[in-house]
Image (cartoon, helix red, strand yellow):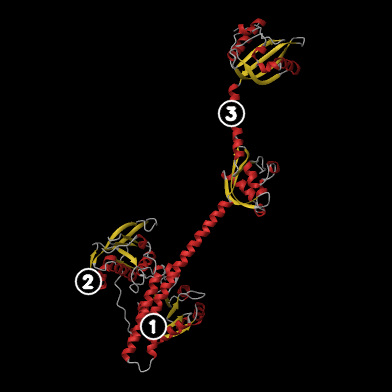
Amino acid sequence: MSEPSPPRPLTDLAQAERFQLLIDAVKDYAIYLLDADGHVATWNTGAQLFKGYTAQEIIGQHFSVFYTPEDLAVEMPRRALETAAREGRFEAEGWRVRKDGTRFWTHVVIDPVYAENGAVMGFAKITRDVSERRATDQALLESERRFRLLVQGVHDYAIYMLDPEGIVTNWNAGAESIKGYKAGEIVGRHFSLFYTPEDRAGGGPARALETALREGRFEGEGERVRKTGERFWASVVIDPIHDDHGTLLGFAKVTRDITEKRDSAREIARAREELLQAQKMEAIGRLTGGVAHDFNNLLTVIRASADFLRRPNLSEEKRARYVNAIAETADRAAVLTGQLLAFARRQPLQPEVFDVGDRLRGLQQIIGTTIGSSVSVQVRLPEIAHRIQADPSQFETAILNMVINARDAMPRGGAITISASHAINVPSVRGHAAAAGDFVAIDIADTGTGMAPDTLARIFEPFFTTKAVDKGTGLGLSQVYGFAKQSRGEVDVRSRLGQGTTFTLYLPRTLAKAGPPPRAPSVDPGSVPVRQILLVEDNQGVGHFAEDLLRELGQTVTWVGDGQAALDLLEHRAAEFDLVFSDVVMPGISGIELGQEIQMRWPALEVILTSGYSHVIAEEGTHGFPLLKKPYSIDGLLEVLRRNASQTAD
């Protein structure tokens, strides 16, 4: 097989023709030759498209025909050729003129063409229409100019750039206004200059940049320092700036002086706090005034009865009357303190599981006796059981308080309807959000006078009452409110003048079984076995009284003044005692802490607590220990001792 013959070399004419075809195929550039004097010698398709001349129209003419009159006036064509001949190249941008007189922006390159002897025989000229690119560049420059004007025109914000190391690279008028430095004073310096010495010592500036890099933004508030050394409160935002390849260029930093705003917010908060404090003091004043009024009434009865009992030759009938007056008044005082604690949600509760319907049916007779014959009562209860876990005595007190309130709203008679139902969720009450859950709703509705909105807003305040003097304490509805809240429930009231009132008590529903009915208390001292009792009470008066009382009841008593003394005694003599009877609120170790320690170290030793008030018990319960509320009676003390002895025997 014969080898292919090598290609024949092209003639100079053929090469020139191919080169011309190549040049003519280029349409984005005007590519043509000039002779040594600047006359057009060749012309390609791109040149015709840009400038509008055909080859026949332009070849032989001087290339200066493309220049503007302004450029011709300064002999720009001649200088361009001289520069190309002298330096080997001329490159520039400028306006050129088409055949129809329109101007366009061009990028021009002129290269000299040399003869074999080295002389310039002409010039190769390449022109490109870059009007669109220039328009884009101009628009960008204009945008940047406007942005600079915008940034410089902002006086409420310091807006400036940092390099990657935190050096300030530019500065706006707002920065000068806020921080006091002129651009020439601060550009090139580190931005940590604006931080307080303590922030610089703690590494605040570096952490701000690190946070901006890590999280894409840093935002915060803090003290900054002006050129004068004055401190101000600033809101700061720092954003990292990256190029298209992700390289960090620096940071954009915006700072605002919010000292005035912060001071205003503080002033508003202070005024609000003063208002709340004033309202609190007003409420405390009203509360203490009510307490003083009611307790002074009670103390008057007690003091007068005690004075009468001191008289000689007092008949037994009168002695019994004054003793009963003291006992009854003490009971009323206990009820009063219980109502106050209930409102404050600090009443020690003894919750039990019971059916609401059963409890309300059991109250019907008492309610009928309480309200009188001019008011009719209808009780509408569901057939199915609705059980709750609450303090039954406090529940009954709350129901009676609402019933009495309804009765007093109907001086000429009327009707009260008591009903209970299952409620899913508690609606929004007094502006609070609705509460989700399973509740039993007990309604007490009356046909009375109703209440105006301003009265309705205050009905649960302690000692607030619209009744005549000595016709009510103003604590009944406060007890309802406190009991509901402490039992994790709510109380709502709806009322309109002339259309009656409906109270709704919401209490959490439970599926637990109700406990057995309580046994009747036994107050026979003989039913309580003699026991060795360690009495723990820090109050001297109460301690002496409790010691004497327990001994009168046949008990053997050892009294110590605090929890640590009790532990020290039990450390050596625990086996001597059957029972520890301790107050809850004491300095040092509380009664609950003492009981827990005894339970852990001497589990066979029984503990009974007593307290008139304890926030721990109110919030957390008795932690499983029996509780006797102060003030306690002989019957109450006997009952708790009997019950404890019975449980121990079981």
- Labelled pair 1, 3 in contact (Cβ < 8 Å): no
Disc 1 is placed on an element classified as: helix
Residue 536, numbered label:
none
Residue under label 3: 139
Q: Which of the two discs, 1 and 3, labels the residue nearer the N terminus?
A: 3
Residue 219 percent across, percent down from the top left: 57, 47
Q: Which amino acid does label 2 sit on?
A: Ser
Q: Which of the two discs, 2 and 1, labels the residue nearer the N terminus?
A: 1
Q: Quadrant of residue 464?
A: bottom left
> Distance from label 1 to label 3 (Cα)?
97 Å
Quadrant in which the C terminus appears = bottom left
Residue under label 2: 373
> Distance from label 2 to label 3 (Cα)?
94 Å
Query: Considering depth in this image, is 400 or 305 the residue closer to the camera?
Result: 305
Residue 460 percent across, percent down from the top left: 37, 65
Disc 3 is placed on an element classified as: helix
Residue 23 percent across, percent down from the top left: 62, 12
Q: Which amino acid does label 1 sit on?
A: Ile
Q: Quadrant of residue 174?
A: top right
Residue 497 percent across, percent down from the top left: 30, 60
Q: Quadrant of residue 644?
A: bottom left
Say which residue appears at 45% left-offset and 77% top-offset: 583
Rate crowding at label 2 as few (under 14), some (14 to 19) or many (20 or more) other CA atoms within 10 Å.
Answer: few
Query: Considering depth in this image, is 52 or 558 the residue closer to the camera?
Result: 52
Rate crowding at label 3 as few (under 14), some (14 to 19) or many (20 or more) other CA atoms within 10 Å.
Answer: few
